[in-house]
Image (cartoon, coloured by chain):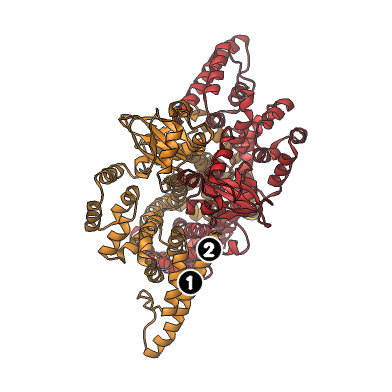
Chain colours: A orange, B red
């Protein structure tokens, strides 16, 4: 029986084989005086190892091979890639993430690439074209039929995150006036139905979408019935311009396996299937997690050190700027700090707590907005609630930290005053954090930006600068 | 045609109706001298509004009603809940998130609850039972058949995040020696096939799983063929004890619609379907996002202010502790800071940059580990790479901030020295951040904990305390 553990076992075995090869190489290399730091050179594979690697590749599902390739460092990845049968190259290129795909494509020559891509469906080719050298994609397009070429053009004309870019074209259509018996015969002429065919699509002569007919209905009804009488008309249809994210929510909510994609003129242009939706949801989750720390989502964990470092610069640069601005706020209060040095130790607490609390508000808002549950009508409610929560938490944590500070600095003679300043600043900054945490995603959305991206940088900047400002101003006031 | 916008429109309309009712109530309330701050009392609904609300509830898909209920404040939610036909209560209870479910169940009396739950399948009942009053769940169980009761017991016996808790029991089984013709006849006896039936399951007399037969194969092969000759034997099967997360990855990788769940004795006990998998993936993504800021994932955005505030305490408490510890590190250097006040303004930059950079490493590691791509064999590789990346970024951002500090404090006479301390501390702390960011998830996993939870608190604690310590120690050394 097939098992996802197969892939893990295969990965472990492949890693072991390469480790052994490397060891052998190191031994012989040392004898020949080679420099083994140069790890990116091709791994030399013994005939025995080659045989085993080839058989592993043959045994595994293409998606498993893709997964194993992603988990290998560049030199081993390319060595293994050589042992994949050329008939499966295409499928695997589709499955690996973009960073890894680039490394694989770079290692293939023109003819190999053309052969690999030609095995794919048009919607899959459309996904690959942006990564292919222009001459390869030109040659592939020449090999397509008229219909396929127009499908390819269509698929490539839609924006990246749209249903149009995700849909496929392999679907079964039937006519309204056919009987189920003739539908059954039509189906029997296939060698296999397209993957994820849970329904066939009913169209008229002009290709206009009329409804769907599930395989279940075809099977449970008598063959003499007419399609029109058993088909479902009240079904979800998507437009190729719908966002993939909205479509995914619809699939999730209505538990769909496939859905018709219909253009403005009402013509059936393709279908979206649940396997694509699963990918969309996973990619979105990856994007959110990576986006929150300024990482690109198509990470190759083994891309070069230099590239990896560079890919993180923008984020770190932005954060350095905000940190320096917050630092200028502090240095405006040099005088106060040199009078009461304890302030220096306490101010990061005020900033940090408000940042943490504001991030809770921000995350809640971003998620609720993504679910569509924050509407114009309940925004005031949501804001009011978050402010009240922040007020309660501000008072509570303000009191706790105030008392703690009083206790810690009880011998300095400034303890009570410090504690009071701490209490006030903590409360005010937590409230500020909640307001900013709620406002940032709302403003970003109003500006047409993705509220999930960059919000926390802005928030941290506000709670840091704001926290230092509030705390040190109050201290200046009280310790005059 | 059904459309997810229906739900948005319905939500907007429902909110409008309640707003209007509230306005009317406020007017008449003011005349009667009522206190309208008391918002949690039942919303009085005019007959006209009642009619429209009821018709909206009838028109919407149960999942859409669930979504609308989640987006309404408590009083309006319960008012709308009254207008949902009692035959749909059960389906909706299954669809709403746990926080909202509790509020709905609390508002129902015992008989309503029993009626609602009795409309559900056993696997759905199993999901609800933990939230039901004991007497209700007892009564529901009495109404079940022997087989259903044993299914319910089975479903409830598996841990929450296991395949067993997610699987359902509605599946079609056939025998190996049947012909496709007789399978077709068997299917025709159903009124409708169970949802997400893309295949039937082949079992022997003892209920042992033998293979699967896709509807596609049933339809394209001639009816005279025998099941044994067309069924697929080499298919993925799940154990009820497999984690739902692993199962979701298998569905994703092999593009499945349903899969057999088979117990240790090889008996078919249920099946897992892709709609559950979609939910698992979405819930995991929600859990990760909320978990990262210490929120519970079953949030009701309209739960009471007090409850919401309390639900955030643990997180804020932990963060307060770590912030106070970092603060003690700073106060150990009081003497140095009072000599060179500029240090107070600069130390948060060192801490923050390392925190940001370490968080990138942490996120990358956590995600790669979740995909299973970080294995014992490549951990050293991954660590080496992250350390090198941190070295490059540490030097680069160290130099940049060092120069900036030199420039900012050029007139103080301490500029160059401050800049040099900044450079050294920044570099060392960014490297520390990378090491901690990589080590924390590996250690958490080795301890059997979820690496996604709490990692960033620990990291921030280390980069804050570590950053203050490194920066201020170096300063003490250089400014003696």
Name the residue: 68% across, 27% down: B107
Please say if B411 is above or below A56: above
Residue that lies at the very extreme toward the bottom in this rendered image: A31
Q: Are marks 1 and 2 on the same chain?
A: yes
Quadrant in the rendering for residue B1 = top left
Please say if B288 is above or below B422: above
Chain of the residue under label 2: A
Residue, disc 1: A15
Name the residue: 43% across, 62% down: A70
Are the residues tagged 1 and 2 within 8 Å (C-beta)? Answer: no
* Residue B439 position within the rendered picture, expressed as x and y whole percent measured from the top left: 54, 65
In this orientation, which residue lies closer to the viewer: A271 or B426? A271
* Residue B153 position within the rendered picture, expressed as x and y whole percent measured from the top left: 73, 44
Chain of the residue under label 1: A
Q: Is B6 on the left or on the right of B90, as rendered?
A: left
Comes first in the chain, label 1 or label 2: 2
Q: Is residue A426 visible?
A: yes
Residue, disc 2: A6
Closer to viewer: mark 1 or mark 2: 2
In this orientation, which residue lies closer to the viewer: B172 or B53? B172
- Where disc 1 sits, the SS reads helix
């Amino acid at each position: 029986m097939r098992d996802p553990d197969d892939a893990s076992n295969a990965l472990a075995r492949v890693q072991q084989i390469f480790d052994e090869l490397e060891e052998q190489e190191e031994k012989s290399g040392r004898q020949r005086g080679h420099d083994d730091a140069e790890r990116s050179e091709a791994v030399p594979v013994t005939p025995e190892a080659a045989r085993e690697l080839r058989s592993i590749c043959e045994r595994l599902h293409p998606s498993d091979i893709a997964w194993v390739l992603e988990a290998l460092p560049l030199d081993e990845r390319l060595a293994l890639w050589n042992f994949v049968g050329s008939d499966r190259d295409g499928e695997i290129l589709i499955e690996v993430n973009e960073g890894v795909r680039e490394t694989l494509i770079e290692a293939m020559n023109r003819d190999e690439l053309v052969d690999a891509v030609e095995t794919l469906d048009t919607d899959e080719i459309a996904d690959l074209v942006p990564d292919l050298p222009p001459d390869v994609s030109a040659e592939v397009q020449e090999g397509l039929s008229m219909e396929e070429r127009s499908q390819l053009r269509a698929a490539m004309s839609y924006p990246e995150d749209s249903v149009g870019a995700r849909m496929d074209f392999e679907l079964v259509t039937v006519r309204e006036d056919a009987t189920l018996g003739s539908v059954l015969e039509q189906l029997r002429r296939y060698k296999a139905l397209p993957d994820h065919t849970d329904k066939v699509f009913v169209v008229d002569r002009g290709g206009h979408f009329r409804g769907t007919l599930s395989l279940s209905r075809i099977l449970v009804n008598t063959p003499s019935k007419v399609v029109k009488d058993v088909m479902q008309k009240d079904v979800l249809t998507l437009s190729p311009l719908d966002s993939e994210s909205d479509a995914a929510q619809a699939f999730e909510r209505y538990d769909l396996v496939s859905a018709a994609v219909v253009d403005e003129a009402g013509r059936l242009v393709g279908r979206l299937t649940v396997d694509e939706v699963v990918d969309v949801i996973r990619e979105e989750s990856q994007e959110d997690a990576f986006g929150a720390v300024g990482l690109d989502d198509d990470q190759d964990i083994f891309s070069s050190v230099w590239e990896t470092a560079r890919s993180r610069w923008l984020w770190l640069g932005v954060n350095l700027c905000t940190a320096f601005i917050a630092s200028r706020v502090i240095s405006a209060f040099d005088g106060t700090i040199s009078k009461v040095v304890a302030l220096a130790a306490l101010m990061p607490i005020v900033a940090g707590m408000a940042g943490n609390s504001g991030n809770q508000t921000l995350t809640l808002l971003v998620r609720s907005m993504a679910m569509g549950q924050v509407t114009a009508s309940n925004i005031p409610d949501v804001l009011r609630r978050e402010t009240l929560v922040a007020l309660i938490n501000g008072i509570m944590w303000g009191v706790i930290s105030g008392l703690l500070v009083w206790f810690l600095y009880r011998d300095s003679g400034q303890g009570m005053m410090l504690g009071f300043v701490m209490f006030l600043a903590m409360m005010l900054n937590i409230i500020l954090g909640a307001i900013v945490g709620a406002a940032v995603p709302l403003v970003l959305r109003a500006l047409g930006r993705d509220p999930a991206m960059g919000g926390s940088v802005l928030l941290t900047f506000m709670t840091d600068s704001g926290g230092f400002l509030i705390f040190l101003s109050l201290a200046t006031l009280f310790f005059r």
